[in-house]
Amino acid sequence: MGAHQRMAQLVELELAAEGVAADGYAMLSLIGVRAPVRLTELAGELGLPLTTASDLVRRLEGRRHVHRRANPEDGRSFLFELTPSGDREWHNGWPALQRINAALERELADSATVRTALVQLKEAFEVALRPMG
């Protein structure tokens, strides 16, 4: 099992310990940080196709964690923000994320070097994803 799968497994277990659903938590968090935010921004930031991002947001709306409203700038798109229950769910997940961070820092000899390497890896992926030409 690769690092990404292990990370997802750990996040799911720790969030479950807090009674928080892992499904859609990244989207919930991003809306919490960026609200009010458009779907295209959410999809771009998470690296998801628009249809996948739309499905995730719809599920969060179904749980009454997210509210959509018309974008006053164009009247066609929507802006998304957390509802009070969505804000509670988002905040309820924070202890799990703090435990994960603390556990990883304990296991990493030089966490600053690892963080730098991960930022460089992210940037390399971004460059590789740019259209060639």
Image (spheres, rainbow, N blue to C red):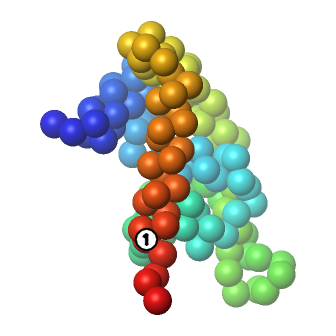
Quarter occupied by residue 69: bottom right
In what quadrant of the picture does the N terminus appear?
Answer: top left
Give the residue at the far right of this rendering. 72
Give the vertical position of 21 relative to 69 (above or below).
above
How many tags in the picture? 1
Left or right of residue 125, residue 76 in this image: right
Closer to the camera in the image, 58 or 29: 29
Quarter occupied by residue 91: top right
Q: Position of residue 127 (x, y in %)?
A: 49, 67
Give the vertical position of 133 relative to 64 (above or below).
below
Q: Residues within 10 Å of mark 1 (few under 14, many from 20)?
A: few
**Residue visible at 83% across and 78% down in the picture:** 72
**Residue visible at 50% across and 22% down in the picture:** 111
**Residue visible at 77% across and 76% down in the picture:** 71
- Residue 9 visible (yes or no): yes
Q: Which residue is mark 1?
A: 129
Q: Position of residue 80 (x, y in %)?
A: 67, 62
Give the residue at the far left of this rendering. 1
Quarter occupied by residue 88: top right
Q: Position of residue 76 (x, y in %)?
A: 70, 87
Looking at the rendered structure, the kind of residue marked 1 is Leu
Give the residue at the far top of this rendering. 106
Helix, strand or loop at disc 1? Answer: helix
Left or right of residue 7, residue 120 in this image: right
- Residue 19 visible (yes or no): no
Q: Position of residue 104 (x, y in %)?
A: 43, 19
Give the vertical position of 126 relative to 71 (above or below).
above
**Residue visible at 59% across and 44% down in the picture:** 29
Closer to the camera in the image, 68 or 105: 105
